[in-house]
Image (cartoon, rainbow, N blue to C red):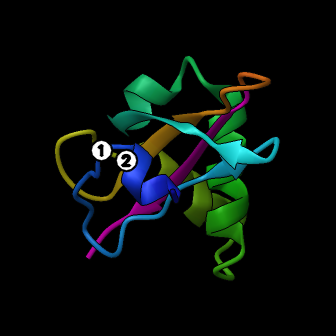
Amino acid sequence: MGIAGRTPGFPGWQEPQWFFHCGDGAAFLGAVGAAELEDYPDAVEVLRREASSWGWSAAQVEDYLNALDKDGQPTAYLFRCRACATHLAYSDFT
């Protein structure tokens, strides 16, 4: 059975993504904004790499990360590896 059959779904602004790490599906922890991400620097770094890949300047990336909103957009979705506890995240907006 695939990850979709073993886990609850979650709504996203675009098509939801699911992280895999250490050979298994990561645990979905929920939607987060900049304030909630302060406790997860590893997830922030994943988000920083994601936004940097869009060709944005470092200042634009940091502005974007600071604008993440748990209850609005842009938002981020936080995951934790079930094996090594690394935190992962991706962001989403319309």
User: In this rendering, does residue 20 appear at all?
Assistant: yes
6 lies above or below 17: above
Tell me if residue 87 is in the magenta stretch: yes
The secondary element bearing badge 2 is classed as loop
Q: Which residues are magenta?
A: 86-94
Q: Tell me what residue is drawn at x 56 percent, y 46 percent.
A: 89
Outermost residue on the front side: it is: 1
27 lies above or below 53: above
Tell me residue 86's x, y (percent).
73, 29
User: In this rendering, does residue 64 appear at all?
Assistant: no
Residue on which disc 2 sits? 68
Disc 2 marks a residue whose amino acid type is: Leu
Asked which quadrant contains residue 66, the reply is top left
Quick check: marks 2 and 1 in contact, CB under 8 Å?
no
Outermost residue on the top side: it is: 39
Asked which quadrant contains residue 93, the reply is bottom left
Numbered label attached to residue 8: 1
Tell me residue 69's x, y (percent).
28, 43
